Image (cartoon, helix red, strand yellow):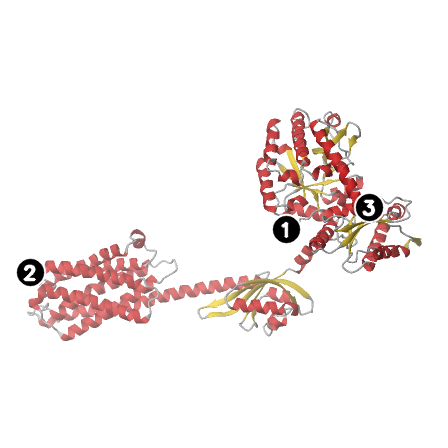
Amino acid sequence: MLSSYGIQLPYVLWSILFSIINGFLMIQSAQKESLTNRVIRSDAIKAVIIGTTFFLTNLFVVLALDLPFESTPFLIYIVTFLLSCIFGTYFVLKLAVNKRLDMGRYVLGGLGLTLVILASDYTAVLILFFPLLEVKPVLLLMTFILTLAISFYSLRFLLQITRETEKVDTNFWVIIGSFATGIALAGIPYLTAMSVLPVINEENPELHLSMLPYALEIVMVWLLSIVPDLFGEQRNQENISKVEVSEQHFQSLFNHNPDAVISFDLNGRFMTANLAAEQVTGYGREELLTMSIKDIVAPVHLSQTLKRFEMTKEGMPQQTEISIIKKDKTQRIVNITGVPIESGHGINGVYTITKDITENKKQSNTIEYLFHYDDYTGLPNRRKFISEVEDFVREQVPFAIYSLDYSRLRTIRDVFGFQVGDQILKELSLRLTTVLPNESIVSRFGGDEIYCLVPTRNQDIQPVLTQLQAILGTPFFVEGHEIFMEMKAGISIYPENGEDPELLIKCADTARASISDNSFHNFAVYKNINLDTSNIEKIIIENELKRAIEQDELTLYYQPKVNSSAMELVGFEALVRWNHPVKGLVSPGLFIPAAEQTNLIVKLEDWVVREACRQLQYWQSTQLKELPVSVNISQRSFANPAFLNNLQNAMAAHTVAASLLEIEITESMTMFNEKETIKKLNQLKELGIRISLDDFGTGYSSLSYLDKLPIDIIKIDKSFIDDLTADQSAMVSTILSIALHNGLGVIAEGVEMKEQVSLLHSLGCDNIQGYYFSRPLPPEEVEAKYIKKAV
C-alpha cells in the first residue's frame, strides 16, 4: 500500500535497522568501559564504523523514496555523504566524552549537530533530486524543530551515559536509548525528503500520509526526552540507597569507634562527638556541643593546638600529642589526628580522631627512666653518668670525678641485712645530692659504687672534700644504734687526667684503690706520674704479649653456658689466658687493656678465632658436637677490613659450620660508625654466624637504636646480676621484656649464687653463665667434666 505513495517498505525497515545499530555503537563508544571501547581504541576508526552505519541508514532512505535519479549524481552523493557522516560522527564522539561540557557548549553542540545532520541530508537531496525540488515551508520548519529536539535529547543521553562513573549495569538503558535514538535519527531523512520533494502519490491525497513520519518523530522526541530522566531517576534511587548504607556504616564506625571521633566547625566549636569522646573528655555529648577547642586543651598546649587547627583548615592533615583537661580537672595526654572536612564548596570543618595515650606514655617513661636511673636510689646510673661526663667534656667545663667507697656498708649488710644497707645507701645518696655544689651529678653504678661529677672552675677540690667529710659527721641510725660511716675518695680531674669518660672513671678508681686502710688521708688524686708509670708497664706488656702470640704462650679457657631449667649445656664462651714463662698465668685484666690500645688486639683476637675453630673441629667427634662457642671481638678487630675474610678462612680451614660460631660485641662499640657497623653485622648474619650483644645495659645505646642492630642474643651484664634481689629486679625484667619484644635470646653472665639462679628463672631467664655452675676451664677439664657424663 505504501509503495503506491512512493515509499518502499523493505528499505524503510533496513534504514531503521542500521539507524538503531548506529545509535547502539554511538552509545557504546560514549561509555568508557564498554566492549566497543575495549576492542577499538582509536576514535578515528570508531568514527569510520559508526559513520558508515549512519550513511547506510540514509542510503536506504533514498532507495525507499522510490524516486528517479541519475547514476552520476548518485556516486557524488555516496562520496560526499559518506565523508560528512564520518566527520560528523567524530565531532559527536569528541563532544560526548567531554565530561566538563558546560551549558553554553552543550547548546552550541546541539545546534552544531542539528546543522550537520540537516546540511548532510539536504545536500544529498540536492545532489540526487534537484529537478524534483518542491519546497514546503511549514514542513521545512517542522523538520528543523524536530531535528533540533532529537539532536539535543540524543546528546543529553550520550553525555549522561558518558558521565556514569560507577560500574553499574546500564545495558537496559543502552538498548532503550539505541532504539529511540536509532528510530528518531532514521526518520530525519524522511522528514527532509517530505519537506522538499513530492513523495506522496497525488492520486490518493485524502490519506494525508505525509504527516505520518512527523507524528512518529514527535513520539520519538517524547521518548528521547524521558529516557534520560528515567535513567537519572534510577541512578538517583540507587545513589540514595547507597548514601543511606554509607550513612549507616559511618554511624556505626562513628558511634562504636574505640577512639574519640569529633568534628569541629571552622571556629573550633564542637559539631559532633561520639561516645568515646565523652569518655576521653569526661563531658556529656550535649555539653561538648556547647564548647570549643579552647575549653578542653591544656593552656601549655593551646597555642600549638590552635596553630595546627589553622593548618588543617587550609587542607593540611595534622598529627600531634597534646594535654587536655577533663571535666574532673585531671589532665590526660592524647594523640590527635586532624583532617579537613571537604565538600563541593571547599573546607567547612575539621574531623579529629583522639586517642588517650596517658598510660602508654607513663609506661614508656618508666622504661626510659629505668635505663637512665637507678630504680632504688633514683640516682643516674652508669649510662646516664657517662652521658653527662661527655656533655661536660664537649662544653670544655673543668670538673673532677670522685669515686667513693663506704666500706662499712658491707659490714652493715652482713650484720643487719641487705634491706637496712639499702636504706642507709638511699639516705647517703640524699645527703650527697643535698650538699654538693649546683650542677654536680651523683651516680650509682651498681652495688655500693657511688661516683660524683663536680665542676672545678677554680681548680680547688678542698671545699668538696670538706662537704663530703661533713656528711659523715652526722650518724646513721640503724635499729636504735648510731653508726658513723667511713669514706675513701679517689679523684680524677678533667682535662689533666684525660678526656675519655671511661678513662677518667678508671683513674678515679685507681686513685681510690691506692689509699691504704691505715692511711692518714681518706682521699687521693690521680697524678700524671702514675699515668707515666702505667705507660711504661704497658710497653713492657705489649712487647711480651707480641712474643707470647708468636711463641704459643696463649691458651683458651671455656666457660660453660647452661640452661638452668633443663640442666643442660647450651654452649661455651672462649676466654683467652696467658701462660707467662716467668709470671705464670697472667690475668686478662692486665694484658687485654694494653692490647686494646694498640693494633695488637687484632692479632690477638685473630688467634682466638682460629684456636676456637680448631677446638670446635675436635669436639665435633665427641658429645660436645653441635654446641656453639662464642668469642669476644673488640672495636679494633671489628673495624679491620680483613676481619670477615680472616673469619671465613678460619672456619674453612677447620671445616666449622657458621652456626657453631658466635661473635660477642659490646654495646658501646656499636655506636662507632653506625652505618658500617650494621652493614658488617648483616654480613656476619648472612654467613650464618650468630651475634651476641655483651654487657647490655652498661653502654650507650638507646631503646630505639637496639631495633636497628641485627643481633640474636642479649647478655645481661654482671653488674645487674650482682644487685639482683626480689626488690631490685626491675632492670633485669625490663631487659627480658625488651629481648622478648625484639625476638632475641637472653643469657645472664656473672651468676654466682643459687638465689640469683632462682630469681632469674622466675623472671624467665634460664640460660646462665657464671661461677655458680663453672669457672672458665681449660679444654682438657671441659672434656673430663662433660664428655663422660651429661650435666
| Residue pointed to by mark 3 | 511
Residue 223 % position (x, y):
27, 67
Label whose residue precedes the other's in the sequence (2 or 3): 2
| Residue drawn at 75 percent across, 37 percent down | 538
- Which amino acid is tagged 1? Ser
In the image, which is nearer the foreground, mark 2 or mark 1? 1
Q: Quadrant of residue 2?
A: bottom left
Q: Is residue 663 left or right of residue 49?
A: right
Does residue 589 show up? no
Asked whether 360 or 286 is in front, the reply is 360
| Residue drawn at 74 percent across, 46 percent down | 503
- Which amino acid is tagged 2? Glu
In the image, which is nearer the foreground, mark 2 or mark 3? 3
Q: Residues within 10 Å of mark 1 (few under 14, many from 20)?
A: few
| Residue pointed to by mark 1 | 704
Asked whether 448 or 62 is in front, the reply is 448
Label whose residue precedes the other's in the sequence (2 or 1): 2
